[in-house]
Amino acid sequence: MGGVSTPHVLLGLLAGGSRHGYELKRAHDERLPRARPLAFGQVYATLGRLERDGLVAAAGQDRVGGPDRTAYALTDQGRVTLDQWLSTVEAPMPYVASTLFAKVVVALLVADADRARSYLIAQRAAHTARLRELTTVKGDPAATLSDVVAADFAIAHLDADLRWLHATLGRVADWHREVHP
Protein backbone atom coordinates (compact mmCIF):
# COMPACT_ATOMS: atom_id res chain seq x y z
CA MET A 1 0.00 0.00 0.00
CA GLY A 2 1.71 3.21 -1.11
CA GLY A 3 1.06 6.73 0.07
CA VAL A 4 -0.80 7.95 3.11
CA SER A 5 -4.08 6.12 3.78
CA THR A 6 -6.54 8.96 4.39
CA PRO A 7 -9.29 6.66 5.72
CA HIS A 8 -6.93 5.15 8.30
CA VAL A 9 -5.56 8.55 9.32
CA LEU A 10 -9.13 9.81 9.86
CA LEU A 11 -9.92 6.69 11.94
CA GLY A 12 -6.81 7.42 14.01
CA LEU A 13 -7.85 11.03 14.53
CA LEU A 14 -11.29 9.84 15.67
CA ALA A 15 -9.76 7.35 18.13
CA GLY A 16 -9.45 10.21 20.65
CA GLY A 17 -13.12 11.17 20.43
CA SER A 18 -15.77 12.39 18.00
CA ARG A 19 -15.09 15.32 15.65
CA HIS A 20 -16.70 16.91 12.64
CA GLY A 21 -15.17 17.18 9.18
CA TYR A 22 -13.70 20.64 9.70
CA GLU A 23 -11.94 19.54 12.91
CA LEU A 24 -10.65 16.39 11.18
CA LYS A 25 -9.20 18.40 8.28
CA ARG A 26 -7.52 20.83 10.68
CA ALA A 27 -6.15 18.01 12.88
CA HIS A 28 -4.85 16.14 9.80
CA ASP A 29 -3.04 19.19 8.45
CA GLU A 30 -1.55 19.98 11.90
CA ARG A 31 -0.51 16.41 12.76
CA LEU A 32 0.87 15.55 9.31
CA PRO A 33 2.51 18.86 8.39
CA ARG A 34 4.60 17.35 5.59
CA ALA A 35 1.66 15.52 3.97
CA ARG A 36 -0.44 17.13 1.27
CA PRO A 37 -3.25 19.09 3.00
CA LEU A 38 -6.65 17.41 2.78
CA ALA A 39 -9.41 19.07 0.80
CA PHE A 40 -12.74 19.40 2.64
CA GLY A 41 -14.43 17.42 -0.14
CA GLN A 42 -11.98 14.57 0.42
CA VAL A 43 -12.69 14.58 4.18
CA TYR A 44 -16.46 14.40 3.67
CA ALA A 45 -16.26 11.83 0.86
CA THR A 46 -13.99 9.64 3.01
CA LEU A 47 -16.27 10.03 6.06
CA GLY A 48 -19.20 8.98 3.84
CA ARG A 49 -17.39 5.78 2.80
CA LEU A 50 -16.28 5.07 6.40
CA GLU A 51 -19.88 5.51 7.58
CA ARG A 52 -21.21 3.30 4.76
CA ASP A 53 -18.69 0.59 5.77
CA GLY A 54 -19.69 0.81 9.44
CA LEU A 55 -16.32 2.15 10.64
CA VAL A 56 -17.66 5.51 11.87
CA ALA A 57 -21.11 6.65 12.91
CA ALA A 58 -22.75 10.06 13.20
CA ALA A 59 -22.45 11.15 16.82
CA GLY A 60 -24.78 14.13 16.88
CA GLN A 61 -25.00 17.51 15.23
CA ASP A 62 -24.39 21.02 16.35
CA ARG A 63 -24.76 24.40 14.76
CA VAL A 64 -22.14 26.96 15.66
CA GLY A 65 -23.06 30.12 13.78
CA GLY A 66 -23.39 28.22 10.52
CA PRO A 67 -24.74 25.08 8.90
CA ASP A 68 -25.42 21.91 10.86
CA ARG A 69 -22.20 20.03 11.45
CA THR A 70 -22.30 16.29 11.97
CA ALA A 71 -19.75 14.90 14.38
CA TYR A 72 -18.45 11.40 13.67
CA ALA A 73 -17.22 8.79 16.12
CA LEU A 74 -15.27 5.58 15.68
CA THR A 75 -17.36 2.40 15.89
CA ASP A 76 -16.07 -0.85 17.42
CA GLN A 77 -15.53 -2.16 13.89
CA GLY A 78 -13.63 1.05 13.07
CA ARG A 79 -11.36 0.51 16.08
CA VAL A 80 -10.64 -3.09 14.98
CA THR A 81 -9.84 -1.89 11.43
CA LEU A 82 -7.52 0.82 12.78
CA ASP A 83 -5.74 -1.69 15.07
CA GLN A 84 -5.25 -4.09 12.14
CA TRP A 85 -3.81 -1.32 9.97
CA LEU A 86 -1.45 -0.18 12.72
CA SER A 87 -0.17 -3.73 13.26
CA THR A 88 0.48 -4.39 9.54
CA VAL A 89 4.09 -3.84 8.47
CA GLU A 90 4.42 -1.88 5.21
CA ALA A 91 6.22 -3.68 2.39
CA PRO A 92 9.45 -1.92 1.40
CA MET A 93 8.64 -0.34 -1.95
CA PRO A 94 10.51 -2.31 -4.64
CA TYR A 95 9.24 -0.09 -7.47
CA VAL A 96 10.43 3.40 -8.16
CA ALA A 97 7.23 5.43 -8.51
CA SER A 98 8.80 8.82 -8.76
CA THR A 99 8.19 11.68 -11.18
CA LEU A 100 11.84 12.64 -10.65
CA PHE A 101 13.00 9.22 -11.90
CA ALA A 102 10.52 9.22 -14.80
CA LYS A 103 11.64 12.65 -16.02
CA VAL A 104 15.31 11.65 -16.08
CA VAL A 105 14.56 8.39 -17.90
CA VAL A 106 12.39 10.19 -20.49
CA ALA A 107 15.05 12.87 -21.02
CA LEU A 108 17.60 10.12 -21.67
CA LEU A 109 15.18 8.20 -23.94
CA VAL A 110 15.02 11.19 -26.24
CA ALA A 111 18.84 10.98 -26.21
CA ASP A 112 19.27 14.49 -24.92
CA ALA A 113 22.08 14.41 -22.38
CA ASP A 114 22.14 18.21 -22.12
CA ARG A 115 18.44 18.33 -21.21
CA ALA A 116 18.84 15.49 -18.70
CA ARG A 117 21.90 17.19 -17.18
CA SER A 118 20.21 20.59 -16.83
CA TYR A 119 17.13 18.94 -15.29
CA LEU A 120 19.30 16.98 -12.83
CA ILE A 121 21.22 20.12 -11.83
CA ALA A 122 18.02 22.15 -11.29
CA GLN A 123 16.44 19.29 -9.34
CA ARG A 124 19.55 18.93 -7.18
CA ALA A 125 19.32 22.65 -6.32
CA ALA A 126 15.62 22.30 -5.39
CA HIS A 127 16.36 19.24 -3.20
CA THR A 128 19.23 21.06 -1.48
CA ALA A 129 17.03 24.09 -0.74
CA ARG A 130 14.30 21.83 0.71
CA LEU A 131 16.89 20.05 2.88
CA ARG A 132 17.95 23.43 4.30
CA GLU A 133 14.29 24.28 5.13
CA LEU A 134 13.77 20.93 6.86
CA THR A 135 16.98 21.30 8.84
CA THR A 136 15.68 24.69 10.04
CA VAL A 137 12.42 23.04 11.17
CA LYS A 138 14.42 20.55 13.25
CA GLY A 139 16.32 23.37 14.93
CA ASP A 140 13.17 25.36 15.76
CA PRO A 141 12.60 25.37 19.55
CA ALA A 142 8.83 25.40 18.90
CA ALA A 143 9.03 22.19 16.81
CA THR A 144 6.98 19.31 18.19
CA LEU A 145 8.15 15.70 18.19
CA SER A 146 5.81 15.14 15.19
CA ASP A 147 7.51 18.02 13.34
CA VAL A 148 10.99 16.63 13.99
CA VAL A 149 10.05 13.04 13.09
CA ALA A 150 8.36 14.27 9.86
CA ALA A 151 11.44 16.38 9.01
CA ASP A 152 13.76 13.40 9.66
CA PHE A 153 11.64 11.22 7.35
CA ALA A 154 11.67 13.82 4.56
CA ILE A 155 15.41 14.50 5.02
CA ALA A 156 16.28 10.80 4.73
CA HIS A 157 14.31 10.51 1.47
CA LEU A 158 15.69 13.76 0.03
CA ASP A 159 19.17 12.59 0.98
CA ALA A 160 18.67 9.33 -0.94
CA ASP A 161 17.33 11.30 -3.94
CA LEU A 162 20.35 13.61 -3.79
CA ARG A 163 22.79 10.67 -3.78
CA TRP A 164 20.94 9.25 -6.79
CA LEU A 165 20.93 12.64 -8.57
CA HIS A 166 24.69 12.98 -8.00
CA ALA A 167 25.43 9.44 -9.27
CA THR A 168 23.14 9.93 -12.28
CA LEU A 169 24.81 13.24 -13.19
CA GLY A 170 28.13 11.35 -13.24
CA ARG A 171 26.67 8.57 -15.42
CA VAL A 172 25.14 11.06 -17.86
CA ALA A 173 28.48 12.88 -18.14
CA ASP A 174 30.34 9.58 -18.76
CA TRP A 175 27.74 8.52 -21.35
CA HIS A 176 27.95 11.88 -23.11
CA ARG A 177 31.78 11.58 -23.31
CA GLU A 178 31.48 8.05 -24.81
CA VAL A 179 28.87 9.07 -27.37
CA HIS A 180 30.60 12.37 -28.29
CA PRO A 181 34.35 11.77 -27.86
Image (cartoon, grey):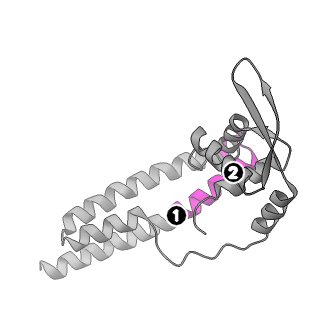
Residue 102 on the magenta span: no
Position of residue 118 measured from the top left corner of the image (x, y, whole percent)? 26, 59
SS category of the residue bearing label 2: helix
Give the residue at mark 1.
Answer: 159
Query: Residue at position x 32%, y 67% from top?
Result: 104
Give the main secondary structure, helix, strand or loop, of the magenta stretch.
helix
Which residue occupies the extreme front position in the image?
A: 52
Residue 153 on the magenta span: yes
- Which residue type carries mark 1? Asp
- Which residue type carries mark 2? Val
Q: Can residue 99 be seen in this view?
A: yes
Query: Residue at position x 12%, y 77% from top?
Result: 180
Measure the alpha-carbon separation of dots 2 and 1. 16 Å
Q: In which quadrant is the N terminus drawn?
A: bottom right
Please report the bounds of the magenta region as a residue range. Answer: 139-159
Residue nearer the viewer, 165 or 85: 85
Position of residue 60 measured from the top left corner of the image (x, y, whole percent)? 83, 35
Q: Is residue 39 visible?
A: no
Q: In which quadrant is the C terminus drawn?
A: bottom left
Q: In which quarter of the image is residue 175?
A: bottom left
Position of residue 46 measured from the top left corner of the image (x, y, whole percent)? 65, 49
Q: In this view, does 70 lie above or below 32?
A: above
Give the residue at mark 2.
Answer: 148
